[in-house]
Image: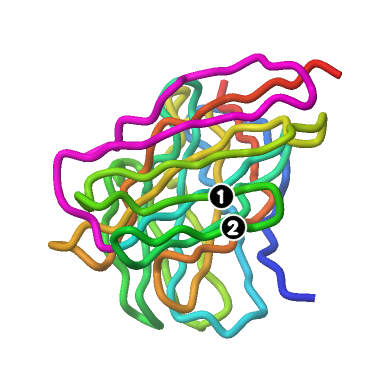
Amino acid sequence: EAQVTQNPRYLITVTGKKLTVTCSQNMNHEYMSWYRQDPGLGLRQIYYSMNVEVTDKGDVPEGYKVSRKEKRNFPLILESPSPNQTSLYFCASSSNSYEQYFGPGTRLTVT
Amino acid sequence: GQQLNQSPQSMFIQEGEDVSMNCTSSSIFNTWLWYKQEPGEGPVLLIALYKAGELTSNGRLTAQFGITRKDSFLNISASIPSDVGIYFCAGRNAGNNRKLIWGLGTSLAVNP
């Protein structure tokens, strides 16, 4: 089954404790992206990757890092999480950057 | 970043009614897409449009790529309870092929 998986689905952590949210797709897509979704603000892109070893900033990249060492994986790293990064995070992949398949989401709470 | 103007923000309708929502942009787009997000899940692509004037259907859903290339419309006919969710429009700007511009969503509630 074609899918995008994210782990964990839910995470509660404390300020400053580094964390990684994993994302994996099994569709051999070149394009992958991370979004955050906050009430009233819609979907905002954090980072995206056009291919292996090629990443670029989206609209809200501050406080986040990504890497793309393999085609199928695109982890999101928060080196020092802060409460304003409490949000719902989605990973997405696509063969063409616009018809995107989304993962189920990761709900992150930073206290 | 740029955002699309999507309206209405929310709708509460009776089962069986038709629904219309739209999305406008200040610049020309060469692709319009409509996604639906159900509670607790990620958005799912409903319809993709690539040509001005194009009208495309997916079951009871019909979307159109506006002639001016600055707007798009989504209609849902004979709504049913499972149509509940948030509908997002997204577009690809002619000047930047790498990213989508998103609307803030239309929240749809259907009263059985």
Q: Position of residue B19 (x, y in %)?
A: 59, 29
Q: Viewed as shown, does residue B98 lie left or right of A28? A: left
Residue B55 higher or lower than B83, as above or below: below
Q: Viewed as shown, does residue B56 lie left or right of B95? A: right
Find the magenta span and give its range: B1-30
Q: Residue B57 carries which label?
A: 2
Chain identity of mark 2? B
- B14 in magenta: yes
What residue do we see at 58% from left, 24% from top? B107
What residue do we see at 69% from left, 62% from top? A5
Mark 1 Cα within 10 Å, few/some/many (few <14, many 20+)? some
Q: Viewed as shown, does residue B2 lie left or right of A8? A: left
Q: Viewed as shown, does residue A42 lie left or right of A90? A: left
- The C terminus of chain A: image quadrant: top right
Identify residue for label 1. B62
Residue B2 higher or lower than B104, as above or below: below
Q: Residue B23 carries which label?
A: none
What residue do we see at 19% from left, 49% from top? B68
Closer to us: B103 or A88: B103
User: Residue extending furthest right?
Assistant: B112
Q: Where is residue A20 in the image (x, y as percent from the top left)?
A: 56, 53
Location of residue B2 (image quadrant): top left
Is there a contact, CB below 8 Å, between mark 1 and mark 2?
yes
Closer to us: B55 or A106: B55
Separation of disc 1 and disc 2 at Cα? Answer: 4 Å
